[in-house]
Amino acid sequence: MSVHAKRAVALAAGLSSPAVVMADWTMNMSPGVTGTSNQIFSLHMTILWICVAIGVVVFGVMFWSIFAHRKSQGAKPANFHENTVVEILWTIIPFAILVAMAIPATATLVEMYDTTESDVDIKITGYQWRWQYEYINEDFGYFSSLSTPRDQIENRQAKGENYLLEVDNPLVIPVGKKVRFLLTANDVIHSWWVPEFGVKKDAIPGFINETWTRVDEPGIYRGQCTELCGKDHGFMPVVVEAVPEEEYNAWVAGQREAAEKERQLTEKDWTMDELMARGEKAYQTACAACHQADGSGMPPAFPALKGSPIATGEMDAHIDIVVNGKSGTAMQAFGNQLSEVDLAAVITYERNAWGNNTGDMVTPKEIFDYKNQE
Ligand SMILES: [Cu+2]
């Protein structure tokens, strides 16, 4: 068979099995699950079709002119320089088209910016590299951190279905209610984005930006930080769980109770074993990204905690660097990111794990007192 024949056969085979050739040709935007995202989608479609119509007319006239008035047919070019009628027409027609497109677009924008009359208000704070959600008026809040295991990230394990798009504590909101988000950041600029809601807003330190959503369909929606915010920018996903209202109310009640329990936990008498177990968990979530799971760090950027003079030395210095961080370095202040219980647990863990056998233990109560003497 000649090369050409082979190619023809391959092409015919390809064309006759579209399932293989067109594996996944979903090219359009998706309409999403909120009124806003649907409006954005229909604007996008309307304007696409206007562009298609303009394209067909303009290229139609152009190709027809080129073909019908070609030189070989003896065509002589017409001369309409400075033709007032043509100049007025080609100014007015595009202007009218632009205005016709701007009217629905502006209406959608105005609605997107209308954050009044909300049913639920949630403050969202971006941190390197996690999100904090605080339910204003409900007296509780929490951090939402990536939950993809480090083994998947470092290719020691097959990657899961929601790789890098899964968190320990998703944001929970009720369906059918207007939820207002107040966005800010604690360190650098982040941006909170959930494509299916048609919501994307910058979170800027020192500013509060507002946006809102109303989700109609219960479900789990995933998004990401969409402002390049440092080393783990790709590791701070957004996960939102939209649930029916009764379920939401029950969840809120549970959260408030848990927050109250947490306050009581600070008072409880902790044993070394309990602190170590809790400390290991907190360490893996909040510290291992830099200091590594085995405490070996990544010197010189991130010091090893195994055998570190601070983690095995004086207790106050250790508490100080974890609670207040060290300004000008990647070591952030964990004082208000972690509860007193988790701070006590993680410090106790660092002083006794990986052969740092100091035997020291610090209680949540001591951390509480430490923070309040400052
Ligand atoms: Cu970010």
Image (cartoon, rainbow, N blue to C red):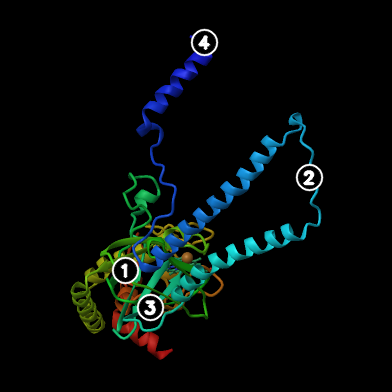
Q: Nearer the viewer, residue 40 or 237?
A: 40
Q: Is residue 65 left or right of residue 231?
A: right
Question: Dots 3 and 1: beta carbons under 8 Å?
Answer: no
Crowdedness near tag 1: few (<14), some (14–19) or many (≥20) residues, C-alpha within 10 Å:
many
Q: Give how far apart the Cα atoms at labels 3 and 2 are.
A: 61 Å
Q: Residue 180 has which mark? A: 3
Q: Residue at x 28, y 73 (%)?
A: 176
Between circles 3 and 1, the one closer to the viewer is 1
Q: Can you tell which quarter of the image residue 222 is in?
A: bottom left
Q: Can you tell which quarter of the image residue 182 is in?
A: bottom left
Task: Name which residue type carries label 1.
Answer: Val
Q: Residue at x 31, y 49 (%)?
A: 161
Q: Position of residue 334 (x, y in %)?
A: 41, 75
Task: Name which residue type carries label 4.
Answer: Ser
Q: Give how far apart the Cα atoms at labels 3 and 1 are.
A: 12 Å
Crowdedness near tag 4: few (<14), some (14–19) or many (≥20) residues, C-alpha within 10 Å:
few
Q: Position of residue 361 (x, y in %)?
A: 30, 74
Q: Residue 78 has which mark? A: 2
Q: Secondary structure at mark 2?
A: loop
Figure quadrant of the C terminus: bottom left
Between circles 4 and 3, the one closer to the viewer is 4
Q: Is residue 176 above or below residue 161?
A: below
Q: Where is mark 4, residue-wise? A: 2
Query: Which numbered disc, 1 or 2, marks the residue that appears first in the sequence?
Result: 2
Task: Name which residue type carries label 3.
Answer: Arg
Q: Nearer the viewer, residue 7 or 125?
A: 7
Query: Which numbered disc, 3 or 2, marks the residue that appears first in the sequence?
Result: 2
Q: Residue 215 has which mark? A: 1
Crowdedness near tag 2: few (<14), some (14–19) or many (≥20) residues, C-alpha within 10 Å:
few
Q: Position of residue 31 (x, y in %)?
A: 38, 58
Q: Give how far apart the Cα atoms at labels 4 and 3 are.
A: 67 Å
